[in-house]
Amino acid sequence: MLISTAGYLGCPQTILKDINTQVQQDPLTQRALREEWSEPLAADSVGTVNLFLLSGTHWVHFDANNNHVKESFERIQPAKTITSQQNPIPARITTKNGVWNSNQANMAELRRQQTNVYCRQYFSESLSCGYKMCWFLHIPVDGDEKFCIETVIRFTKNPMCLQKAGAVFTGYYENNHPGVYFSMPVLLSLLWALLKAGMVSEVFSVLSVCLTHKIVPGHEFLLGLFNCVREKGLLSLVPELMQLTFKMANAGLLLSLDCLDSVKNTPEFQQTNSHVSGTGPNKVSPSAPFPEYLNLAHSIVEIELCTKQEDWRRMGEVFRSICQSSQRPNQVERISGRITIALLSESKDKLSLPFAAFAETACKNEEGESLNRSFCGRIGISLMLRYYKTHQWAKGRRVVEVLSCSKVNYTTLQGLFGNENGTSRCYLVTVAAELFLQSGSVEGALNTLRENKWFVSSASWPCESSDLESRIRVLQRLAEKSSHRDSLEVLSNLPGLKEPNNLLDISMYTPLFNTHLQMCLERHTLPVASDTVDFMFSKNLAVDQAMLHMLLNKLGKQNLWLRARDLFRHSLRVGYYPGVCAPPGSMFLVVPCRLGELELALTLEMFITVNANSLLHLPENSTSHLSITLKRTQSCESEYLSASNRLASAACIPNPKLDVLYTTVNSAQEQVYTLDISSARAWLRQNHLWANEVWTH
């Protein structure tokens, strides 16, 4: 009921006369005065008002705040809006200077100017407002958050004022966003005080208001609320509690095992369908979204229980059901993170790997790229990286083996945790290989690299320089522990060799290859050594000249002539024998004196073959001849003289033998020899088929 004095700026008698007239002409007003005022009135309310008029200028009455209302009307200038706790918003506030509409910007200033806007009895800790319809505010006005929080703090400390504390809090924040004075500790104190007092309905009201602002308490309070509802047997409140729980979870509350266990143990959990389809007052509407959350919560509880019981196969079954039923991959990702942490826990059986049983069940009968196979791979990656970081090589190796057996393409996936998002595919392959290597399985490391085609980088999966350094380090160690043939395969897949990389200078690999070549020569694995030299030639890596010389001689001594000829020809092509000159059609050969016997023999074969047409068409009585000049390349005379002996020995290596005769010394003091044409023809007739293939193509 509102009796306004707006616009009455005259004498008090005029105002009271108009009020009396209003009461006399309005039966509803008279009835309200009889029914709603807690103070008894005279039987004739109109008479009471008339009595006020007849009392003269000394009439005094007390309002709800015990303010004296005198003839001057100084204390009743603002027309108080009759306001209840349920409807705290005043319609209009009138001052001497006119109308001041209530809004958030000026209400706080108004409260400071007019101290009687709030009900003193309601905001008192020792009193209470007895009026069913009070002329003063029971709810802080917009923008008066500081007063609201101060009041809640006072009322929370007084058990007799807890209901008012909840009403003040909900009344204010129903219409206002939390500001600078909002305090989470104050909210939690209020919630715990209401809960301890058993005022569950008030707790629900406070929580509902908080959820509109995305504010949620901790899981400890939610657990206490569940326990209170269960202990007091408040089954009618369970549906609303379940809705609040999952709204809070959706707003960001991380539910603990105890909270979820409480959800699971509620009788309504097993009757979810009846809640969804029910139409009774305590049933949840069919459009309520929480049954999906219930299933999810149930699954999380099962996972936690499986962790405690170390039932990894059951955990795999629960995970598979989650992946098959969930429509939200982000929820599956969060659950996968929980599972990863659970699988990292220390098992009673130190020798077992929880992930093995989990993955076997989770990926059972799955084909293709399914959701559970994908997230199983991501779980495996997180486990693998964790074991790698903590040097648990054997466990990490077994994780990789499980992923391979489950046919999970883990190298194209990412881990589950924030620091694993930037992990490149190159690094994952390297980590998997090193886990095998560190656990003693060289073959496993090789197979891992081969299965992933020695992947380093691509446009879709780029890598950093640190990833390249890690790969180089692992491949070097792997090459040291592998057989010579496998070592060559490892070295040939060093970053930058198969695919050019601007971040690397491949010339730094030269010492590695020469060291490998030396080991092959020392252990007489000449075919591998020959392949190593060929690979180095193809990548423009410098081959040690002494080792190349040694390799050719060893190949010849072991009658590996095909390899020797191929290697010598390849060496000539890339410029390792610049002093050897035998152009086709020329009857003159120049050879450096530093060549060994085998190299000289191969040079003679090449010299005869490239001049085959000329030799075969010469008449028998021709005076033409093949000339060989032994070129000086060293200052030591003894070395040069020994070269002539090597040339004579080299002529005996081909089959049939060649006849080389000393002729003279030229002006440069270099020895000149003559190759007998008849012996050259004899060698050609016997070897021209393969010789032409080797030396002229």
Image (cartoon, rainbow, N blue to C red):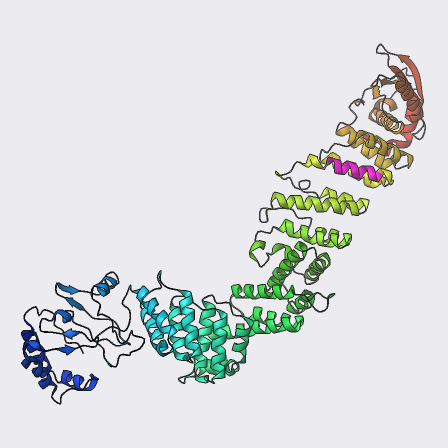
Q: Is residue 160 magenta?
A: no
The magenta stretch spans which residues? 510-520
Q: Is residue 197 left or right of residue 625?
A: left
Image x and y of residue 431, in percent: 67, 52
Quarter of the picture containing the N terminus is bottom left
Q: Looking at the rendering, which quadrant does residue 614 occupy?
A: top right
Quarter of the picture containing the C terminus is top right
Image x and y of residue 283, in percent: 43, 82
Image x and y of residue 374, in percent: 60, 62
Q: Is residue 513 magenta?
A: yes
Who's the residue at 82% across and 32% down the image?
548
Image x and y of residue 157, in percent: 38, 73
Q: Is residue 654 above or below residue 283?
A: above
Q: Main secondary structure of the magenta part?
A: helix
In this rendered view, identify the residue nearer to me: 570 or 623. 570
Q: Is residue 140 left or right of residue 198?
A: left
Who's the residue at 28% across and 71% down the image?
139
Res. 25 in view: no
Q: Looking at the rendering, which quadrant does residue 205 occupy?
A: bottom left
Q: Is residue 161 above or below residue 510?
A: below
